[in-house]
């Protein structure tokens, strides 16, 4: 089967017993593997949950930080933020699983094998386990203020805007579309201040 997975008794065997034998809370589903995971905040302590690893590369986390927590089907980045982790956007390092009684970062385990394959081959987009095509947000660096700007990739128009920015070696914040008709007087004031500083006003929100 693709990606090296095999079928056994109707289940997709994504990882061997040897690869998972020391991990805590392993559960095999029809098209996923689930294990106990967590993320540690210096302020709030450990937030625990269960991560599901799908063969198509999707990762979903159900949070169990408190008995009443309703957070479900979180992305790793969302779980990292929900846990209160101070150094966010490093979820591969900050989210851990228990291996042989020790906390081990995800990137040091086999659990990211399918995620990494999809990330490498799909050029920023992939199919979720429900069959729909999904896209990760991408970033482009402004050549004027040297800040990275987030591009949402949810629609064809948003993808087109990102592709145009990526192709422009001199892309700047002023090239990012925004609704001029909705500007208030305060926004116009920011325009004036930004002009005095030699920046585009959007740069002020990311400084």
Image (spheres, rainbow, N blue to C red):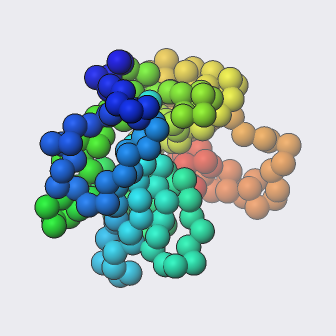
Image coords of residue 79 (percent x, y)? 46, 60
As displayed, is residue 117 above or below residue 93? above
Residue 141 position by quadrant:
top left
- Residue 128 seen from this side: yes
Image coords of residue 114 (percent x, y)? 34, 32
- Which residue is most to the front? 9
- Residue 41 seen from this side: no
Q: Residue at x 38, y 69 (%)?
A: 48
As displayed, is residue 179 above or below residue 82? above
Image coords of residue 51 (percent x, y)? 40, 53
Q: Residue at x 76, y 61 (%)?
A: 186
Q: Residue at x 63, y 56 (%)?
A: 193
Image coords of residue 7 (percent x, y)? 36, 27
The image shows a total of numbered marks equal to 0
As displayed, is residue 94 above or below residue 30? below
Q: Between residue 102 and residue 206, name the one nearer to us.
A: 102
Q: Between residue 6 and residue 84, name the one nearer to us.
A: 6
- Which residue is most to the right? 181
Task: Name the side, left or right, on which 25 lies relative to 168.
Answer: left
Residue 41 position by quadrant:
bottom left
In what quadrant of the picture does the N terminus appear? top left
Q: Residue at x 20, y 42 (%)?
A: 17
């Amino acid at each position: 089967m693709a990606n090296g997975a095999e079928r056994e008794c109707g289940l997709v065997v994504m990882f061997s017993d040897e690869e998972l034998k020391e991990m805590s809370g392993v559960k095999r589903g029809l098209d996923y593997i689930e294990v106990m995971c967590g993320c540690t905040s210096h302020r709030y302590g450990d937030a625990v949950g269960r991560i599901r690893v799908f063969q198509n590369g999707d990762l979903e986390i159900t949070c169990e930080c408190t008995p009443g927590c309703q957070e479900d089907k979180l992305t790793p980045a969302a779980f990292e933020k929900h846990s209160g982790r101070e150094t966010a956007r490093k979820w591969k390092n900050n989210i851990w699983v228990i291996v042989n009684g020790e906390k081990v970062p995800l990137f040091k385990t086999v659990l990211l094998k399918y995620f990494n394959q999809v990330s490498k081959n799909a050029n920023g987009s992939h199919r979720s386990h429900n069959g729909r095509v999904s896209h990760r947000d991408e970033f482009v660096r402004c050549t004027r203020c040297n800040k990275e700007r987030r591009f949402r990739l949810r629609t064809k128009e948003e993808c087109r805007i990102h592709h145009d920015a990526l192709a422009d070696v001199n892309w700047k914040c002023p090239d990012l579309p925004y609704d001029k008709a909705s500007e208030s007087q305060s926004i116009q004031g920011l325009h004036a201040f930004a002009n005095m500083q030699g920046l585009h006003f959007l740069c002020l929100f990311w400084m």
